Image: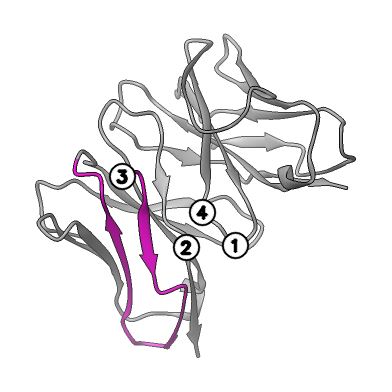
């Protein structure tokens, strides 16, 4: 019940397109869902996060959509740019727990 | 405001040796978590330290141990290194009274075990 499943493993999008990465979780106690961006040789950087009391959160070109009944959430990157090329991780956690449970990651490539 | 820093950047050890990795938390943060990230995988939680005590542990054997100091910096110690311990070790800091579960990661230490 601690798993977070992420798809796709890799994604290629043209510049200006929309990148969509999906995650599904099993543990209904999870109540915090962040997305991290990681460049090669760097640590993950917190991008955006959502809690289950809202269905969508937008920050600039990045949007999280959350479907509590389906136990799924997704990251949408609008107007994707070559600088967005990185590995993206979804994660989940529950209040009172110490750990983030991460998905396997999606390697995103934006072609110019 | 300074971010999370880790040292060393890279480390090469041989099987059976011991290693110590260091982490300085983000200014104002009092909680430190350690994660192991194998190549091509997501980070896996090792343990967390708060008020100089272990405050939760993942599925890692006792040869993985840690410390937190009064200035909130932390160490990860790994004894009897195995080849599978080769990974990027990430430290994340957070504020216990801040946004729940919001963690900020350092650049990591790349450990290679030969």
Q: Are marks 1 and 4 in contact (CB under 8 Å)?
A: no
The magenta region covers A1-28
Report whether residue A59 is seen.
Answer: no
Establish whether labels 3 and 1 are both on one chain. no
Q: Do the residues labelled 2 and 3 touch (CB within 8 Å)?
A: no
- Mark 1 residue element: loop
Q: How far apart are marks 1 and 4 (CA)?
A: 7 Å
What is the C-alpha distance between the residues marked 3 and 1?
22 Å
Q: Which chain carries label 4?
A: B
Give the residue number, with chain letter if any, for mark 4: B42
Asked whether A105 or B32 is in front, the reply is A105
Q: In this view, does B109 lie to the left or right of A44?
A: right
CA distance for labels 4 and 3: 17 Å
Front residue of A101 and B71: A101
| Marks 1 and 2 share the same chain | no
Q: Is residue A93 above or below residue B56?
A: below
Q: Distance between the residues labelled 2 and 3?
A: 19 Å
Q: Where is residue A80 in the image (x, y as percent from the top left)?
A: 38, 80
Q: In this view, does B77 lie to the left or right of A62?
A: right
Decide if residue A89 is on the left or right side of residue B106. left
Residue drawn at 29 percent across, 77 percent down = A78
* Label pair 1/2, CB-CB below 8 angstroms: yes
Q: Which of marks 3 and 1 is in front?
A: 3
Residue A1 badge: 3
- Report the mark closest to the observer, 2 or 3: 3
Check if residue B1 falls in the magenta segment.
no
Q: Residues within 10 Å of mark 3 (few under 14, many from 20)?
A: few
Residue at numbered disc 1: B40
Residue density around tag 1, few if under 14, some if 14–19, many if 20 or more, within 10 Å:
few
């Amino acid at each position: 019940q601690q798993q977070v499943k992420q798809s796709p493993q890799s994604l290629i999008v043209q510049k200006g397109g929309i990148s969509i990465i999906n995650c599904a979780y099993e543990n209904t106690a999870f109540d915090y869902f962040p997305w991290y961006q990681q460049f090669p040789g760097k640590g993950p950087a917190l991008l955006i996060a959502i809690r289950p009391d809202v269905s969508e959160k937008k920050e600039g070109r990045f949007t999280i959509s959350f479907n509590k009944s389906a136990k799924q959430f997704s990251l949408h990157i609008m107007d994707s740019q070559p600088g967005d090329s990185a590995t993206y991780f979804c994660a989940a956690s529950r209040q009172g727990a110490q750990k983030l449970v991460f998905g396997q990651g999606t390697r995103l490539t934006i072609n110019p | 405001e300074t971010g999370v820093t880790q040292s060393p950047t890279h480390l090469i050890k041989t099987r059976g040796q011991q290693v110590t990795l260091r982490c300085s938390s983000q200014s104002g943060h009092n909680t430190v978590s350690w994660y192991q990230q194998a190549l091509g995988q997501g980070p896996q939680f090792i343990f967390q330290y708060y008020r100089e005590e272990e405050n939760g542990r993942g599925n890692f054997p006792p040869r993985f141990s840690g410390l937190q100091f009064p200035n909130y910096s932390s160490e990860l110690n790994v004894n009897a290194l195995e080849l599978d311990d080769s990974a990027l070790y990430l430290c994340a800091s957070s504020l216990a009274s801040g946004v729940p579960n919001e963690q900020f990661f350092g650049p990591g230490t790349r450990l290679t075990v030969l």
